[in-house]
Image: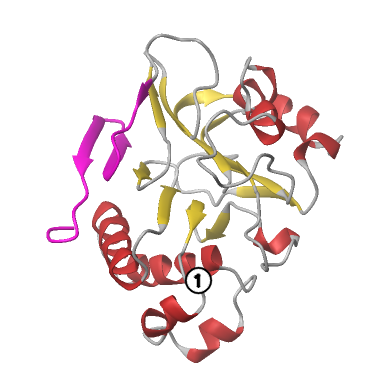
Amino acid sequence: MCRHIGYLGEPVPPAEVLFRAPHSLLVQSYAPADMRGGGSVNADGFGLGWYPGPAGAAPLRHRRSTPLWTDETLPALAASVTSGAFVAAVRNGTTGMPVTEAAAAPFTAGRWLFSHNGVVRGYPDSLAELAKTLPITELLTLEAPTDSAVLWALLRARLAAGEDPLQAVAALTAAVEAAAPGSRLNFLLTDGETLIGTAWTHALSLLVTETGVLLSSEPCDGDPRWRPVPDHHAVRATAAGVDLLPLTLEHP
Protein backbone atom coordinates (compact mmCIF):
# COMPACT_ATOMS: atom_id res chain seq x y z
CA MET A 1 0.00 0.00 0.00
CA CYS A 2 0.97 3.68 0.00
CA ARG A 3 0.41 6.80 2.10
CA HIS A 4 -0.98 10.02 0.73
CA ILE A 5 -2.10 13.50 1.77
CA GLY A 6 -4.36 16.04 0.08
CA TYR A 7 -4.95 19.66 1.07
CA LEU A 8 -7.38 22.41 0.05
CA GLY A 9 -7.62 25.83 1.68
CA GLU A 10 -5.65 28.98 2.26
CA PRO A 11 -2.15 28.86 0.74
CA VAL A 12 0.34 27.07 3.02
CA PRO A 13 3.78 25.47 2.61
CA PRO A 14 3.40 21.73 1.92
CA ALA A 15 6.47 21.17 4.11
CA GLU A 16 4.33 21.47 7.24
CA VAL A 17 2.62 18.10 6.73
CA LEU A 18 5.30 16.52 4.56
CA PHE A 19 8.23 17.05 6.92
CA ARG A 20 7.50 19.10 10.05
CA ALA A 21 4.44 17.48 11.64
CA PRO A 22 5.03 14.82 14.34
CA HIS A 23 3.58 12.11 12.07
CA SER A 24 4.41 13.77 8.76
CA LEU A 25 4.38 12.01 5.40
CA LEU A 26 8.11 11.49 5.89
CA VAL A 27 7.49 9.60 9.14
CA GLN A 28 4.64 7.68 7.55
CA SER A 29 7.01 6.56 4.80
CA TYR A 30 9.20 4.57 7.21
CA ALA A 31 6.97 4.17 10.30
CA PRO A 32 3.36 3.89 9.09
CA ALA A 33 0.75 3.19 11.74
CA ASP A 34 -2.02 1.57 9.68
CA MET A 35 -0.86 -0.30 6.58
CA ARG A 36 -3.44 -3.10 7.09
CA GLY A 37 -1.23 -5.88 5.83
CA GLY A 38 0.11 -3.90 2.91
CA GLY A 39 3.77 -3.91 3.89
CA SER A 40 5.74 -2.01 6.50
CA VAL A 41 7.53 0.83 4.68
CA ASN A 42 6.85 3.07 1.70
CA ALA A 43 10.20 3.25 -0.06
CA ASP A 44 9.32 2.76 -3.74
CA GLY A 45 9.01 6.39 -4.74
CA PHE A 46 7.20 9.58 -3.81
CA GLY A 47 5.71 12.68 -5.31
CA LEU A 48 4.30 16.13 -4.60
CA GLY A 49 1.98 18.07 -6.88
CA TRP A 50 0.92 21.65 -6.12
CA TYR A 51 -0.62 24.73 -7.71
CA PRO A 52 1.86 27.60 -7.96
CA GLY A 53 -0.35 30.30 -9.43
CA PRO A 54 -3.89 31.70 -9.40
CA ALA A 55 -7.03 29.68 -10.01
CA GLY A 56 -6.85 27.99 -13.39
CA ALA A 57 -3.08 27.43 -13.36
CA ALA A 58 -1.78 23.94 -14.07
CA PRO A 59 -0.04 22.13 -11.21
CA LEU A 60 3.67 21.52 -10.88
CA ARG A 61 5.07 18.18 -9.77
CA HIS A 62 8.19 16.70 -8.19
CA ARG A 63 8.56 12.90 -8.27
CA ARG A 64 11.30 10.36 -7.66
CA SER A 65 11.56 6.56 -7.63
CA THR A 66 13.62 6.55 -4.42
CA PRO A 67 12.55 6.73 -0.75
CA LEU A 68 11.37 10.13 0.43
CA TRP A 69 14.04 10.25 3.14
CA THR A 70 16.81 10.16 0.49
CA ASP A 71 15.71 13.32 -1.31
CA GLU A 72 17.69 16.42 -0.34
CA THR A 73 15.79 18.74 -2.68
CA LEU A 74 12.16 18.39 -1.66
CA PRO A 75 12.33 19.60 1.97
CA ALA A 76 13.63 23.01 0.94
CA LEU A 77 11.35 23.14 -2.10
CA ALA A 78 8.25 22.26 -0.06
CA ALA A 79 9.14 24.95 2.48
CA SER A 80 9.76 27.65 -0.12
CA VAL A 81 6.40 27.47 -1.90
CA THR A 82 2.83 28.05 -0.74
CA SER A 83 -0.21 26.53 -2.35
CA GLY A 84 -3.95 26.45 -1.79
CA ALA A 85 -4.09 22.81 -2.87
CA PHE A 86 -1.64 19.94 -3.11
CA VAL A 87 -1.40 16.16 -3.19
CA ALA A 88 1.61 14.21 -1.94
CA ALA A 89 2.24 10.48 -1.73
CA VAL A 90 4.82 7.86 -0.83
CA ARG A 91 4.69 4.48 -2.56
CA ASN A 92 4.94 0.88 -1.47
CA GLY A 93 4.77 -0.87 -4.82
CA THR A 94 2.80 -4.07 -5.25
CA THR A 95 5.02 -7.10 -5.86
CA GLY A 96 5.70 -7.48 -9.57
CA MET A 97 5.02 -3.85 -10.45
CA PRO A 98 7.91 -1.61 -11.53
CA VAL A 99 9.67 0.85 -9.24
CA THR A 100 9.98 3.89 -11.49
CA GLU A 101 9.40 7.60 -11.16
CA ALA A 102 6.47 7.35 -13.58
CA ALA A 103 4.72 4.91 -11.21
CA ALA A 104 4.75 7.36 -8.30
CA ALA A 105 1.72 9.51 -7.48
CA PRO A 106 0.45 12.07 -7.97
CA PHE A 107 -0.54 11.51 -11.57
CA THR A 108 -1.62 14.57 -13.49
CA ALA A 109 -3.49 15.72 -16.58
CA GLY A 110 -4.48 19.31 -17.24
CA ARG A 111 -5.44 20.81 -13.88
CA TRP A 112 -5.97 17.46 -12.14
CA LEU A 113 -3.83 15.68 -9.56
CA PHE A 114 -4.64 12.07 -8.62
CA SER A 115 -3.33 9.52 -6.13
CA HIS A 116 -4.35 5.91 -5.42
CA ASN A 117 -3.59 4.23 -2.11
CA GLY A 118 -4.40 0.55 -2.40
CA VAL A 119 -4.36 -2.35 -4.83
CA VAL A 120 -6.59 -3.81 -7.54
CA ARG A 121 -7.08 -7.50 -6.83
CA GLY A 122 -6.23 -9.80 -9.73
CA TYR A 123 -4.54 -7.09 -11.78
CA PRO A 124 -4.07 -7.00 -14.75
CA ASP A 125 -6.69 -9.60 -15.72
CA SER A 126 -9.37 -8.10 -13.50
CA LEU A 127 -9.16 -4.71 -15.24
CA ALA A 128 -9.09 -6.08 -18.78
CA GLU A 129 -12.78 -5.49 -19.56
CA LEU A 130 -12.75 -1.96 -18.13
CA ALA A 131 -9.53 -1.17 -19.99
CA LYS A 132 -11.22 -2.11 -23.28
CA THR A 133 -13.26 1.09 -23.00
CA LEU A 134 -10.08 3.15 -23.45
CA PRO A 135 -8.50 3.98 -26.81
CA ILE A 136 -5.66 1.61 -27.61
CA THR A 137 -3.26 4.56 -27.89
CA GLU A 138 -4.17 5.50 -24.32
CA LEU A 139 -3.16 2.05 -23.09
CA LEU A 140 0.04 2.04 -25.15
CA THR A 141 1.15 5.37 -23.68
CA LEU A 142 0.40 4.82 -19.99
CA GLU A 143 3.02 6.34 -17.70
CA ALA A 144 3.64 2.97 -16.06
CA PRO A 145 2.27 -0.60 -16.31
CA THR A 146 0.57 -0.43 -12.90
CA ASP A 147 -2.96 -0.71 -11.55
CA SER A 148 -2.87 2.92 -10.39
CA ALA A 149 -1.92 4.18 -13.86
CA VAL A 150 -4.83 2.27 -15.42
CA LEU A 151 -7.22 3.62 -12.78
CA TRP A 152 -6.08 7.13 -13.57
CA ALA A 153 -6.61 6.56 -17.29
CA LEU A 154 -10.15 5.33 -16.60
CA LEU A 155 -10.89 8.26 -14.30
CA ARG A 156 -9.52 10.98 -16.53
CA ALA A 157 -11.58 9.58 -19.43
CA ARG A 158 -14.69 10.17 -17.31
CA LEU A 159 -13.52 13.66 -16.38
CA ALA A 160 -12.76 14.50 -20.01
CA ALA A 161 -16.29 13.39 -20.91
CA GLY A 162 -17.65 16.02 -18.52
CA GLU A 163 -18.71 13.84 -15.60
CA ASP A 164 -19.00 15.48 -12.21
CA PRO A 165 -15.75 14.68 -10.35
CA LEU A 166 -17.44 13.05 -7.37
CA GLN A 167 -19.74 11.01 -9.61
CA ALA A 168 -16.76 9.97 -11.72
CA VAL A 169 -14.82 8.78 -8.67
CA ALA A 170 -17.85 6.97 -7.26
CA ALA A 171 -18.67 5.26 -10.56
CA LEU A 172 -15.06 4.16 -11.04
CA THR A 173 -14.95 2.76 -7.51
CA ALA A 174 -18.14 0.77 -8.12
CA ALA A 175 -16.93 -0.53 -11.49
CA VAL A 176 -13.55 -1.65 -10.16
CA GLU A 177 -15.04 -3.27 -7.07
CA ALA A 178 -17.44 -5.21 -9.30
CA ALA A 179 -14.59 -6.35 -11.54
CA ALA A 180 -12.06 -6.96 -8.77
CA PRO A 181 -13.84 -7.58 -5.45
CA GLY A 182 -11.87 -6.78 -2.34
CA SER A 183 -9.74 -4.12 -3.98
CA ARG A 184 -8.44 -1.22 -1.91
CA LEU A 185 -9.49 1.99 -3.62
CA ASN A 186 -8.54 5.03 -1.58
CA PHE A 187 -8.36 7.91 -4.04
CA LEU A 188 -7.38 11.58 -3.82
CA LEU A 189 -8.38 13.91 -6.64
CA THR A 190 -8.14 17.69 -6.93
CA ASP A 191 -8.21 20.41 -9.56
CA GLY A 192 -7.12 23.09 -7.09
CA GLU A 193 -10.71 24.09 -6.29
CA THR A 194 -12.30 20.78 -5.24
CA LEU A 195 -10.68 18.01 -3.21
CA ILE A 196 -12.20 14.52 -3.26
CA GLY A 197 -11.06 11.55 -1.21
CA THR A 198 -12.39 8.01 -0.82
CA ALA A 199 -12.08 5.40 1.91
CA TRP A 200 -12.60 1.97 0.38
CA THR A 201 -11.15 -0.84 2.53
CA HIS A 202 -8.23 1.33 3.66
CA ALA A 203 -7.64 4.08 6.20
CA LEU A 204 -8.29 7.77 5.58
CA SER A 205 -8.55 10.59 8.10
CA LEU A 206 -10.04 14.07 7.79
CA LEU A 207 -9.05 17.32 9.47
CA VAL A 208 -11.15 20.46 8.98
CA THR A 209 -9.73 23.72 10.38
CA GLU A 210 -10.56 27.39 10.04
CA THR A 211 -8.13 27.68 7.13
CA GLY A 212 -8.36 24.42 5.21
CA VAL A 213 -9.07 20.72 4.84
CA LEU A 214 -6.57 17.88 5.08
CA LEU A 215 -7.16 14.31 3.97
CA SER A 216 -4.44 11.89 5.01
CA SER A 217 -3.94 8.14 5.19
CA GLU A 218 -3.00 8.72 8.82
CA PRO A 219 -3.37 11.77 11.11
CA CYS A 220 -0.27 13.95 10.88
CA ASP A 221 -0.39 15.12 14.50
CA GLY A 222 -2.38 14.89 17.72
CA ASP A 223 -4.98 17.51 16.83
CA PRO A 224 -8.24 16.21 18.37
CA ARG A 225 -10.19 17.42 15.34
CA TRP A 226 -8.85 14.57 13.20
CA ARG A 227 -11.55 11.99 12.53
CA PRO A 228 -11.58 8.78 10.52
CA VAL A 229 -13.51 8.71 7.27
CA PRO A 230 -15.89 5.73 7.47
CA ASP A 231 -15.20 2.87 5.11
CA HIS A 232 -17.06 3.07 1.79
CA HIS A 233 -17.44 6.83 2.06
CA ALA A 234 -16.22 9.82 0.08
CA VAL A 235 -15.26 13.31 1.18
CA ARG A 236 -15.79 16.33 -1.05
CA ALA A 237 -14.25 19.65 0.01
CA THR A 238 -14.84 22.97 -1.74
CA ALA A 239 -14.87 26.61 -0.71
CA ALA A 240 -18.52 26.07 0.23
CA GLY A 241 -17.76 23.38 2.81
CA VAL A 242 -17.09 19.69 3.35
CA ASP A 243 -19.48 16.83 2.53
CA LEU A 244 -19.20 13.24 3.76
CA LEU A 245 -21.08 10.93 1.42
CA PRO A 246 -21.64 7.15 1.26
CA LEU A 247 -20.33 5.12 -1.67
CA THR A 248 -22.40 2.12 -2.74
CA LEU A 249 -22.23 -0.39 -5.54
CA GLU A 250 -25.92 0.03 -6.28
CA HIS A 251 -26.08 3.83 -6.32
CA PRO A 252 -22.63 5.27 -6.99
Q: Specify the segment rendered in magenta.
A: 227-252
Q: Which residue is mark 1?
A: 150
Q: As drawn, is 56 to the left or to the right of 37?
A: left
Residue type, numbered disc 1:
Val
Q: Nearer the viewer, residue 138 or 23?
A: 23
Q: How far across and how far down the image is residue 154, in percent?
A: 41, 71
Q: Is residue 4 visible?
A: yes
Q: Is residue 114 visible?
A: no
| Residue at image coords 60%, 43% | 89
Q: How far across and how far down the image is residue 106, in percent?
A: 58, 51
Is 176 included in the stretch rendered in magenta? no
Give the farthest residue toward the front: 37
Identify the secondary structure beneath mark 1.
helix
| Residue at image coords 34%, 67% | 176
Asked if residue 101 is positioned above or below residue 153 in the image, the reply reads: above
- Bin the neighbour count of mark 1 within 10 Å (Cα to Cα): few under 14, some 14-19, many 20 and up: many
Q: Nearer the viewer, residue 74 or 10?
A: 74
Q: Nearer the viewer, residue 207 or 60?
A: 207
Asked if residue 233 is positioned above or below residue 209 in the image, the reply reads: below
